[in-house]
Image: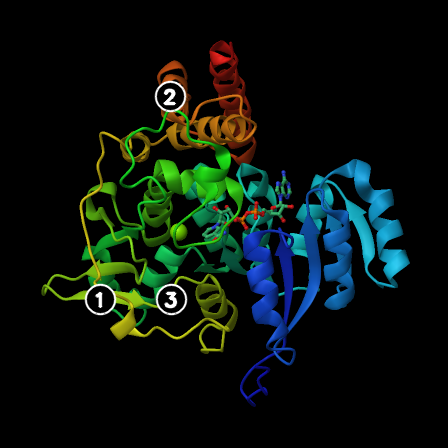
Amino acid sequence: MVDSVTAASVMRSVTILGATGSIGASALDVIARHPHRFRVHAATAQTNVAELADIALKFTVDVAVIGDPTLERPLRDALRSRGAKATARAGRSALIHVAQAPECDTVLAAIVGSAGLEPTIAAAEAGKRLLLANKEAIVCAGELMMAAVKRGAAMLLPVDSEHNAIHQCLAGLPESERATARLILTASGGPFLKRDDLEDVTPDQACAHPKWVMGRKISVDSATLMNKGLEVIEASWLFQIPADRIDIVIHPQSVIHSMVELPDGSVLAQMGTPDMRTPLAYALGWPERITSGARRLHLESAGPLTFEAPDRTRFRCLGYAYSALKRGGGASVVLNAANEIAVEAFLDERLRFTEIAPTIERTLEAYDPPPPRTIADVLDIDNEARERASEFVTDKVP
Ligand code: NAD
Ligand code: MG
Protein backbone atom coordinates (compact mmCIF):
# COMPACT_ATOMS: atom_id res chain seq x y z
CA MET A 1 0.00 0.00 0.00
CA VAL A 2 1.43 3.35 -1.01
CA ASP A 3 0.19 6.22 1.16
CA SER A 4 -0.53 9.80 0.28
CA VAL A 5 1.33 12.46 2.16
CA THR A 6 -0.28 14.66 4.78
CA ALA A 7 0.25 18.40 4.77
CA ALA A 8 2.31 18.17 7.96
CA SER A 9 4.85 15.62 6.72
CA VAL A 10 8.19 16.58 5.28
CA MET A 11 10.09 14.81 2.55
CA ARG A 12 13.03 13.09 4.21
CA SER A 13 16.27 12.26 2.47
CA VAL A 14 17.81 9.07 3.80
CA THR A 15 21.29 7.55 3.73
CA ILE A 16 21.19 3.80 4.27
CA LEU A 17 24.44 2.39 5.64
CA GLY A 18 24.23 -1.35 4.95
CA ALA A 19 21.46 -1.18 2.33
CA THR A 20 22.00 -4.73 1.05
CA GLY A 21 21.53 -6.39 4.43
CA SER A 22 18.44 -7.73 6.13
CA ILE A 23 17.68 -4.41 7.89
CA GLY A 24 18.54 -2.45 4.75
CA ALA A 25 16.07 -4.53 2.72
CA SER A 26 13.30 -4.08 5.30
CA ALA A 27 13.91 -0.33 5.40
CA LEU A 28 13.79 -0.08 1.61
CA ASP A 29 10.52 -2.01 1.66
CA VAL A 30 9.01 0.57 4.04
CA ILE A 31 10.48 3.46 2.05
CA ALA A 32 9.00 2.09 -1.20
CA ARG A 33 5.55 2.29 0.43
CA HIS A 34 5.98 6.03 1.06
CA PRO A 35 7.48 7.64 -2.04
CA HIS A 36 6.11 11.04 -1.03
CA ARG A 37 7.79 10.96 2.36
CA PHE A 38 11.23 9.48 1.71
CA ARG A 39 13.91 9.51 -0.90
CA VAL A 40 17.22 7.66 -0.71
CA HIS A 41 20.22 9.95 -0.96
CA ALA A 42 22.90 7.28 -0.51
CA ALA A 43 23.05 3.52 -0.17
CA THR A 44 26.07 1.47 0.89
CA ALA A 45 27.20 -2.15 0.83
CA GLN A 46 30.46 -3.90 1.59
CA THR A 47 30.87 -6.24 -1.42
CA ASN A 48 27.52 -6.89 -3.09
CA VAL A 49 27.97 -4.71 -6.18
CA ALA A 50 25.03 -6.11 -8.18
CA GLU A 51 22.48 -5.66 -5.41
CA LEU A 52 23.74 -2.19 -4.59
CA ALA A 53 23.43 -1.18 -8.25
CA ASP A 54 19.89 -2.61 -8.37
CA ILE A 55 18.96 -0.54 -5.32
CA ALA A 56 20.57 2.56 -6.83
CA LEU A 57 18.45 2.15 -9.95
CA LYS A 58 15.17 1.31 -8.20
CA PHE A 59 15.41 4.15 -5.67
CA THR A 60 17.14 6.71 -7.92
CA VAL A 61 19.91 7.00 -5.37
CA ASP A 62 22.36 9.93 -5.67
CA VAL A 63 25.44 8.15 -4.32
CA ALA A 64 26.24 4.42 -4.11
CA VAL A 65 29.13 3.47 -1.85
CA ILE A 66 30.91 0.14 -1.82
CA GLY A 67 32.94 -0.44 1.35
CA ASP A 68 35.57 -2.61 -0.34
CA PRO A 69 37.81 -0.08 -2.16
CA THR A 70 38.82 -2.62 -4.81
CA LEU A 71 35.23 -2.74 -6.06
CA GLU A 72 34.79 0.88 -7.10
CA ARG A 73 35.32 0.11 -10.79
CA PRO A 74 32.92 -2.87 -10.86
CA LEU A 75 30.34 -0.71 -9.06
CA ARG A 76 30.72 2.07 -11.63
CA ASP A 77 30.31 -0.48 -14.45
CA ALA A 78 27.27 -2.07 -12.80
CA LEU A 79 25.61 1.33 -12.35
CA ARG A 80 26.32 2.28 -15.95
CA SER A 81 25.07 -1.02 -17.39
CA ARG A 82 21.76 -0.56 -15.56
CA GLY A 83 21.39 3.07 -16.49
CA ALA A 84 21.50 4.10 -12.81
CA LYS A 85 22.46 7.75 -12.33
CA ALA A 86 24.16 7.32 -8.95
CA THR A 87 27.75 8.42 -8.41
CA ALA A 88 29.99 5.50 -7.41
CA ARG A 89 32.27 5.91 -4.41
CA ALA A 90 34.26 3.44 -2.36
CA GLY A 91 35.99 2.89 0.94
CA ARG A 92 35.82 3.98 4.53
CA SER A 93 36.04 7.73 3.90
CA ALA A 94 33.14 7.54 1.43
CA LEU A 95 31.00 5.76 4.06
CA ILE A 96 31.75 8.55 6.53
CA HIS A 97 31.13 11.18 3.86
CA VAL A 98 27.61 9.98 2.98
CA ALA A 99 26.72 9.62 6.68
CA GLN A 100 27.29 13.32 7.23
CA ALA A 101 26.36 14.70 3.80
CA PRO A 102 24.16 17.82 3.95
CA GLU A 103 21.97 16.25 1.23
CA CYS A 104 20.53 13.80 3.77
CA ASP A 105 18.69 14.49 7.02
CA THR A 106 18.23 10.87 8.10
CA VAL A 107 20.79 8.07 8.42
CA LEU A 108 19.94 4.43 8.97
CA ALA A 109 22.94 2.77 10.62
CA ALA A 110 22.52 -0.85 9.49
CA ILE A 111 26.08 -2.02 8.94
CA VAL A 112 26.86 -5.13 10.95
CA GLY A 113 29.64 -5.04 13.54
CA SER A 114 32.07 -2.41 14.76
CA ALA A 115 32.80 -1.66 11.08
CA GLY A 116 29.78 0.65 11.29
CA LEU A 117 31.14 2.70 14.18
CA GLU A 118 32.82 5.57 12.35
CA PRO A 119 30.00 6.44 9.91
CA THR A 120 27.45 6.09 12.72
CA ILE A 121 29.35 8.52 14.92
CA ALA A 122 29.79 10.83 11.92
CA ALA A 123 26.01 10.93 11.44
CA ALA A 124 25.53 11.74 15.14
CA GLU A 125 28.11 14.53 15.00
CA ALA A 126 26.41 15.94 11.91
CA GLY A 127 23.10 16.19 13.78
CA LYS A 128 21.15 13.69 11.67
CA ARG A 129 18.05 11.79 12.60
CA LEU A 130 20.00 8.64 13.41
CA LEU A 131 18.08 5.38 13.12
CA LEU A 132 20.28 2.94 14.97
CA ALA A 133 20.24 -0.77 14.11
CA ASN A 134 24.03 -1.24 14.33
CA LYS A 135 24.08 -2.23 18.00
CA GLU A 136 27.80 -3.11 17.97
CA ALA A 137 28.56 0.60 17.42
CA ILE A 138 26.83 1.70 20.62
CA VAL A 139 28.15 -1.32 22.54
CA CYS A 140 31.72 -0.30 21.65
CA ALA A 141 31.40 3.44 22.05
CA GLY A 142 28.29 4.08 24.16
CA GLU A 143 29.60 7.07 26.05
CA LEU A 144 31.25 8.64 23.01
CA MET A 145 28.20 8.06 20.86
CA MET A 146 25.80 9.62 23.37
CA ALA A 147 28.18 12.58 23.64
CA ALA A 148 28.29 12.90 19.82
CA VAL A 149 24.48 12.82 19.68
CA LYS A 150 24.36 15.62 22.24
CA ARG A 151 27.05 17.70 20.56
CA GLY A 152 25.48 17.34 17.14
CA ALA A 153 21.91 17.77 18.50
CA ALA A 154 21.09 14.56 16.64
CA MET A 155 17.86 12.65 17.15
CA LEU A 156 18.64 9.05 18.09
CA LEU A 157 15.87 6.57 17.31
CA PRO A 158 16.47 2.91 18.13
CA VAL A 159 15.59 0.33 15.48
CA ASP A 160 16.50 -2.81 17.44
CA SER A 161 13.02 -4.17 18.21
CA GLU A 162 13.51 -4.31 22.00
CA HIS A 163 14.87 -0.78 22.25
CA ASN A 164 12.30 0.48 19.83
CA ALA A 165 9.61 -1.10 22.05
CA ILE A 166 11.11 0.60 25.11
CA HIS A 167 11.30 3.92 23.26
CA GLN A 168 7.60 3.56 22.51
CA CYS A 169 6.77 2.66 26.14
CA LEU A 170 8.79 5.57 27.54
CA ALA A 171 7.45 8.14 25.07
CA GLY A 172 5.43 10.74 26.92
CA LEU A 173 6.65 9.77 30.40
CA PRO A 174 8.19 12.55 32.46
CA GLU A 175 11.97 12.46 32.86
CA SER A 176 11.70 11.60 36.58
CA GLU A 177 9.76 8.42 35.80
CA ARG A 178 12.06 7.41 32.98
CA ALA A 179 14.98 7.67 35.36
CA THR A 180 13.47 5.19 37.82
CA ALA A 181 12.05 2.70 35.29
CA ARG A 182 13.12 -0.94 35.13
CA LEU A 183 13.60 -2.33 31.64
CA ILE A 184 12.55 -5.86 30.76
CA LEU A 185 14.08 -7.04 27.50
CA THR A 186 12.36 -10.00 25.92
CA ALA A 187 14.42 -12.68 24.16
CA SER A 188 13.06 -15.40 21.91
CA GLY A 189 15.74 -17.76 23.24
CA GLY A 190 16.98 -18.57 19.74
CA PRO A 191 16.95 -21.96 18.01
CA PHE A 192 18.68 -23.86 20.84
CA LEU A 193 16.50 -22.90 23.77
CA LYS A 194 15.60 -26.54 24.46
CA ARG A 195 18.56 -28.31 22.83
CA ASP A 196 21.40 -29.57 25.01
CA ASP A 197 23.89 -31.21 22.60
CA LEU A 198 25.37 -28.15 20.95
CA GLU A 199 28.83 -29.60 20.13
CA ASP A 200 28.07 -30.34 16.48
CA VAL A 201 25.74 -27.48 15.64
CA THR A 202 26.26 -26.23 12.07
CA PRO A 203 26.17 -22.58 10.94
CA ASP A 204 22.91 -23.19 9.05
CA GLN A 205 21.28 -24.67 12.17
CA ALA A 206 22.42 -21.71 14.24
CA CYS A 207 21.10 -19.27 11.64
CA ALA A 208 17.66 -20.90 11.44
CA HIS A 209 15.98 -18.54 13.87
CA PRO A 210 12.49 -19.65 14.90
CA LYS A 211 10.91 -16.18 14.74
CA TRP A 212 13.07 -13.59 12.98
CA VAL A 213 14.79 -13.63 9.58
CA MET A 214 18.08 -11.77 10.03
CA GLY A 215 21.68 -11.53 8.87
CA ARG A 216 23.96 -14.46 9.76
CA LYS A 217 26.02 -12.71 12.45
CA ILE A 218 23.05 -11.55 14.53
CA SER A 219 21.41 -14.96 14.02
CA VAL A 220 24.39 -16.69 15.65
CA ASP A 221 24.34 -14.03 18.40
CA SER A 222 20.70 -14.93 19.01
CA ALA A 223 21.61 -18.61 19.27
CA THR A 224 24.31 -17.93 21.91
CA LEU A 225 22.15 -15.21 23.56
CA MET A 226 25.08 -12.82 23.08
CA ASN A 227 22.59 -10.76 21.10
CA LYS A 228 20.65 -10.18 24.32
CA GLY A 229 23.87 -9.42 26.15
CA LEU A 230 24.79 -6.78 23.56
CA GLU A 231 21.24 -5.43 23.85
CA VAL A 232 21.57 -4.98 27.62
CA ILE A 233 24.63 -2.79 27.01
CA GLU A 234 22.81 -0.99 24.18
CA ALA A 235 19.77 -0.34 26.41
CA SER A 236 21.92 0.95 29.25
CA TRP A 237 23.47 3.63 27.01
CA LEU A 238 20.34 4.53 25.09
CA PHE A 239 18.11 4.96 28.12
CA GLN A 240 20.81 5.80 30.71
CA ILE A 241 19.75 2.96 33.00
CA PRO A 242 22.28 0.89 35.00
CA ALA A 243 22.74 -2.85 34.45
CA ASP A 244 20.97 -3.80 37.69
CA ARG A 245 17.74 -2.28 36.39
CA ILE A 246 17.76 -4.17 33.11
CA ASP A 247 16.24 -7.66 33.18
CA ILE A 248 15.90 -10.31 30.52
CA VAL A 249 12.96 -12.66 30.14
CA ILE A 250 12.71 -15.48 27.60
CA HIS A 251 9.52 -15.15 25.58
CA PRO A 252 9.69 -17.61 22.67
CA GLN A 253 6.64 -16.28 20.82
CA SER A 254 8.26 -12.84 20.26
CA VAL A 255 4.90 -11.07 20.53
CA ILE A 256 5.95 -8.71 23.31
CA HIS A 257 9.04 -6.89 22.08
CA SER A 258 10.05 -5.52 25.50
CA MET A 259 8.59 -3.87 28.59
CA VAL A 260 9.06 -1.04 31.02
CA GLU A 261 8.16 -1.36 34.72
CA LEU A 262 7.21 1.83 36.53
CA PRO A 263 7.25 2.63 40.27
CA ASP A 264 3.46 2.28 40.65
CA GLY A 265 3.71 -1.36 39.50
CA SER A 266 2.47 -0.71 35.95
CA VAL A 267 4.27 -2.68 33.26
CA LEU A 268 4.01 -1.19 29.77
CA ALA A 269 4.61 -3.50 26.81
CA GLN A 270 4.81 -3.04 23.06
CA MET A 271 3.44 -5.93 20.98
CA GLY A 272 3.26 -6.90 17.34
CA THR A 273 4.17 -9.59 14.85
CA PRO A 274 7.93 -10.19 14.65
CA ASP A 275 8.76 -8.01 11.63
CA MET A 276 11.54 -5.42 11.63
CA ARG A 277 9.50 -3.23 9.30
CA THR A 278 7.45 -2.16 12.34
CA PRO A 279 10.33 -0.60 14.32
CA LEU A 280 11.80 0.74 11.06
CA ALA A 281 8.51 2.44 10.14
CA TYR A 282 8.28 3.86 13.67
CA ALA A 283 11.79 5.30 13.45
CA LEU A 284 11.44 6.51 9.86
CA GLY A 285 8.11 8.18 10.49
CA TRP A 286 8.61 9.41 14.07
CA PRO A 287 6.71 11.20 15.51
CA GLU A 288 4.11 10.24 12.93
CA ARG A 289 2.92 6.64 12.58
CA ILE A 290 3.19 5.26 9.06
CA THR A 291 2.26 1.91 7.54
CA SER A 292 4.97 -0.76 7.47
CA GLY A 293 3.55 -3.75 5.60
CA ALA A 294 3.80 -5.92 8.73
CA ARG A 295 1.02 -8.45 9.33
CA ARG A 296 -1.49 -7.45 11.99
CA LEU A 297 -1.20 -9.19 15.32
CA HIS A 298 -4.12 -11.54 15.97
CA LEU A 299 -3.82 -12.37 19.64
CA GLU A 300 -6.47 -15.09 19.48
CA SER A 301 -4.24 -17.08 17.11
CA ALA A 302 -0.89 -16.08 18.63
CA GLY A 303 -1.14 -19.04 21.03
CA PRO A 304 -0.26 -18.89 24.71
CA LEU A 305 2.36 -16.29 25.57
CA THR A 306 5.02 -17.86 27.80
CA PHE A 307 7.86 -16.42 29.84
CA GLU A 308 10.82 -17.97 31.62
CA ALA A 309 14.11 -16.91 33.15
CA PRO A 310 17.20 -17.29 30.92
CA ASP A 311 19.53 -20.19 31.75
CA ARG A 312 22.75 -18.31 32.46
CA THR A 313 24.76 -21.51 32.89
CA ARG A 314 24.03 -22.75 29.38
CA PHE A 315 24.15 -19.29 27.84
CA ARG A 316 27.29 -17.85 29.39
CA CYS A 317 27.55 -14.89 27.03
CA LEU A 318 24.81 -13.15 28.99
CA GLY A 319 26.96 -13.04 32.12
CA TYR A 320 30.00 -11.79 30.16
CA ALA A 321 27.95 -8.91 28.77
CA TYR A 322 26.57 -7.86 32.17
CA SER A 323 30.01 -7.92 33.72
CA ALA A 324 31.56 -6.02 30.78
CA LEU A 325 28.91 -3.33 31.22
CA LYS A 326 29.56 -3.12 34.96
CA ARG A 327 33.33 -3.12 34.47
CA GLY A 328 33.06 -0.24 32.01
CA GLY A 329 36.19 1.05 30.33
CA GLY A 330 37.11 -0.91 27.28
CA ALA A 331 35.53 -4.20 28.40
CA SER A 332 32.51 -3.86 26.11
CA VAL A 333 34.79 -3.21 23.12
CA VAL A 334 36.76 -6.37 23.95
CA LEU A 335 33.57 -8.38 24.47
CA ASN A 336 32.21 -7.26 21.12
CA ALA A 337 35.42 -7.75 19.15
CA ALA A 338 36.02 -11.23 20.59
CA ASN A 339 32.44 -12.14 19.77
CA GLU A 340 32.74 -10.87 16.19
CA ILE A 341 35.92 -12.91 15.67
CA ALA A 342 34.46 -16.05 17.26
CA VAL A 343 31.19 -15.83 15.31
CA GLU A 344 33.04 -15.26 12.04
CA ALA A 345 35.22 -18.32 12.77
CA PHE A 346 32.14 -20.38 13.59
CA LEU A 347 30.41 -19.30 10.37
CA ASP A 348 33.59 -20.25 8.45
CA GLU A 349 33.59 -23.62 10.27
CA ARG A 350 36.91 -22.89 11.98
CA LEU A 351 35.39 -22.95 15.48
CA ARG A 352 32.71 -25.02 17.17
CA PHE A 353 29.53 -23.36 18.37
CA THR A 354 30.43 -24.34 21.94
CA GLU A 355 33.82 -22.64 21.60
CA ILE A 356 32.34 -19.18 20.97
CA ALA A 357 31.74 -18.39 24.66
CA PRO A 358 35.16 -19.67 25.86
CA THR A 359 36.90 -17.59 23.18
CA ILE A 360 35.16 -14.47 24.47
CA GLU A 361 35.91 -15.37 28.08
CA ARG A 362 39.62 -15.95 27.38
CA THR A 363 39.93 -12.67 25.49
CA LEU A 364 38.24 -10.74 28.30
CA GLU A 365 40.59 -12.35 30.84
CA ALA A 366 43.69 -11.66 28.73
CA TYR A 367 42.98 -8.06 27.85
CA ASP A 368 41.70 -5.34 30.16
CA PRO A 369 42.37 -2.02 28.40
CA PRO A 370 41.92 1.43 29.95
CA PRO A 371 38.73 3.35 29.13
CA PRO A 372 38.71 4.68 25.56
CA ARG A 373 38.61 8.48 25.45
CA THR A 374 38.31 8.91 21.69
CA ILE A 375 36.97 6.92 18.76
CA ALA A 376 40.59 6.26 17.77
CA ASP A 377 41.06 4.60 21.21
CA VAL A 378 37.98 2.44 20.61
CA LEU A 379 39.32 1.36 17.22
CA ASP A 380 42.73 0.53 18.74
CA ILE A 381 41.15 -1.59 21.49
CA ASP A 382 38.90 -3.25 18.92
CA ASN A 383 41.95 -4.14 16.78
CA GLU A 384 43.98 -5.46 19.67
CA ALA A 385 41.05 -7.53 20.99
CA ARG A 386 40.48 -8.98 17.51
CA GLU A 387 44.12 -10.03 17.33
CA ARG A 388 44.00 -11.68 20.75
CA ALA A 389 40.71 -13.44 20.02
CA SER A 390 42.06 -14.65 16.65
CA GLU A 391 45.01 -16.23 18.46
CA PHE A 392 42.63 -18.17 20.71
CA VAL A 393 40.67 -19.29 17.65
CA THR A 394 43.86 -20.46 15.91
CA ASP A 395 44.88 -22.36 19.07
CA LYS A 396 41.75 -24.43 18.72
CA VAL A 397 42.11 -25.27 15.05
CA PRO A 398 43.48 -28.85 14.89
P1 NAD B 1 23.39 -8.22 7.33
O1 NAD B 1 24.60 -9.06 7.45
O2 NAD B 1 22.18 -8.78 6.69
O3 NAD B 1 23.75 -6.85 6.57
C1 NAD B 1 24.87 -6.11 6.91
C2 NAD B 1 25.07 -4.93 5.97
O4 NAD B 1 26.29 -4.29 6.35
C3 NAD B 1 25.21 -5.30 4.49
O5 NAD B 1 24.66 -4.29 3.68
C4 NAD B 1 26.73 -5.36 4.28
O6 NAD B 1 27.12 -5.09 2.94
C5 NAD B 1 27.19 -4.26 5.22
N1 NAD B 1 28.54 -4.53 5.73
C6 NAD B 1 29.01 -5.70 6.24
N2 NAD B 1 30.29 -5.57 6.63
C7 NAD B 1 30.65 -4.29 6.36
C8 NAD B 1 31.85 -3.55 6.52
N3 NAD B 1 32.96 -4.11 7.01
N4 NAD B 1 31.85 -2.24 6.13
C9 NAD B 1 30.75 -1.66 5.61
N5 NAD B 1 29.57 -2.32 5.42
C10 NAD B 1 29.53 -3.62 5.80
O7 NAD B 1 23.05 -7.71 8.81
P2 NAD B 1 21.63 -7.30 9.42
O8 NAD B 1 20.97 -8.49 9.97
O9 NAD B 1 20.91 -6.41 8.46
O10 NAD B 1 22.10 -6.46 10.69
C11 NAD B 1 22.61 -5.14 10.56
C12 NAD B 1 22.73 -4.53 11.95
O11 NAD B 1 21.43 -4.40 12.51
C13 NAD B 1 23.53 -5.41 12.93
O12 NAD B 1 24.25 -4.58 13.80
C14 NAD B 1 22.45 -6.15 13.70
O13 NAD B 1 22.84 -6.48 15.01
C15 NAD B 1 21.34 -5.09 13.75
N6 NAD B 1 19.99 -5.65 13.89
C16 NAD B 1 19.52 -6.49 12.95
C17 NAD B 1 18.23 -7.03 13.08
C18 NAD B 1 17.65 -7.92 12.02
O14 NAD B 1 16.49 -8.29 12.14
N7 NAD B 1 18.38 -8.29 10.99
C19 NAD B 1 17.47 -6.71 14.21
C20 NAD B 1 18.00 -5.84 15.16
C21 NAD B 1 19.27 -5.30 14.99
MG1 MG C 1 16.86 -7.08 19.06
Q: Amino acid at mark 3?
A: Thr
* In this view, 104 is above or below 114: below
Mark nearer the N terminus (3 vs 1)? 1
Query: Label 3 to label 1, Cα distance in Å?
Result: 17 Å
- The x, y position of residue 174, in whole percent, is 25, 68
Q: Can you tell me whether the CB of the residue at mark 3 lies under 8 Å from the nearest atom of ligand 1? A: no
Residue carrying label 2: 364
**Looking at the image, do the residues carrying marks 3 and 1 touch, with CB atoms under 8 Å apart?**
no
Q: Which element type, helix, strand or loop, lies under badge 3?
A: loop
Tell me the tag on residue 273. 3
Visible residue check, residue 136: no
Q: 236 left or right of 184?
A: right
Q: 388 left or right of 64?
A: left
- The x, y position of residue 147, in whole percent, is 45, 48
**Badge 3 density bin: few <14, some 14–19, many ≥20, Cα 10 Å:** many
Query: Label 2 to label 1, Cα distance in Å?
Result: 36 Å
